[in-house]
Image: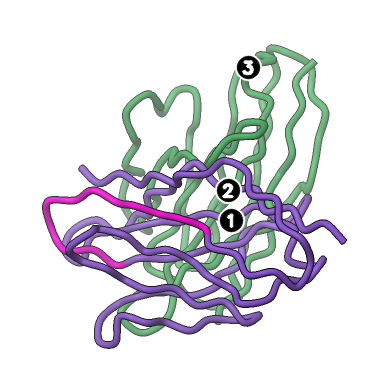
Chain colours: A green, B purple
Amino acid sequence: SAVISQKPSRDICQRGTSLTIQCQVDSQVTMMFWYRQQPGQSLTLIATANQGSEATYESGFVIDKFPISRPNLTFSTLTVSNMSPEDSSIYLCSASTGAGNYGYTFGSGTRLTVV
Amino acid sequence: AQSVTQLDSQVPVFEEAPVELRCNYSSSVSVYLFWYVQYPNQGLQLLLKYLSGSTLVKGINGFEAEFNKSQTSFHLRKPSVHISDTAEYFCAVRTIQGAQKLVFGQGTRLTINP
């Protein structure tokens, strides 16, 4: 199955700054997803990223705060903008893979701490 | 919209004992079902999935799950757990048609005691 390389693995950032997280997949995938996992919580979908079109955001998430790029079928970035301590979370990317897209591969996550 | 409820936030068991992690889902349409495991400071790893066919699904590391459509459940079981099974377990669903996004349950922290 596909392998996703996600970086950085962790970062400590100052409030008011932005961080861009990158995910590289070792094969072409149609759909990529970005999740947030707050401390001790489950995964919440931020947006779905399709190549060649704008990302589709879930309720409660907006493009100005979490701009996403999907320039090709193997790469995507998520930017966390104008960060506050409430943005401290683990951010994970995922891709639907396999025949029929019934498989999902996850990156290892980015642990973000905003101070 | 779909939703997933994992009935136990924490499950402590002794090593070599059996375990069941419960998952119930809600959906007005047919769904696919998944169980993922997350070890500390790692991403998610697929344990097993139900797409169609036999309702008893076998996965990696000796885990299995049974799909029960009438009870809208997909409970995960292992007959004998090991210390290395200590992790967070997530149940997830996606609809067969439409968006391919996964909806996750709240997670169950499985702790294996010696």
Mark-to-mark CA distance, 1 and 3:
25 Å
What are the residue bounds of the magenta stretch?
B21-32
Query: Mark 3 packing: few (<14 Cα in 10 Å), some, or many (20+)?
Result: few
The residue drawn where x is 75% and y is 73% is B16
| Chain name for mark 3 | A
B24 with respect to A94 (left or right): left
The residue drawn where x is 81% and y is 35% is A11
* Tag 1: amino acid: Tyr
Nearer the camera: disc 3 or disc 2: 2
Q: Are marks 1 and 2 in contact (CB under 8 Å)?
A: yes
| Chain name for mark 1 | B
Residue B26 at what x, y percent from top left?
23, 48
| Residue that badge 1 annotates | B89
| Chain name for mark 2 | B
Q: Are marks 3 and 2 in contact (CB under 8 Å)?
A: no
Q: Nearer the viewer, residue B22 or B32?
A: B22
Point out which mark residue A86 bears: 3
Disc 1 with disc 3 on a shared chain: no
Nearer the camera: disc 1 or disc 3: 1
Query: Is A69 included in the stretch rendered in magenta?
Result: no
Disc 3 with disc 2 on a shared chain: no
Q: Quadrant of the N terminus of chain B?
A: top left
Disc 1 with disc 2 on a shared chain: yes
**Element at label 1:** strand
| Residue that badge 2 annotates | B108
* Tag 2: amino acid: Thr
Query: Which label's residue is closer to the chain start, 1 or 2?
Result: 1
Query: Mark 1 packing: few (<14 Cα in 10 Å), some, or many (20+)?
Result: many
B58 with respect to B103 (left or right): right
- View extreme (left): residue: B28
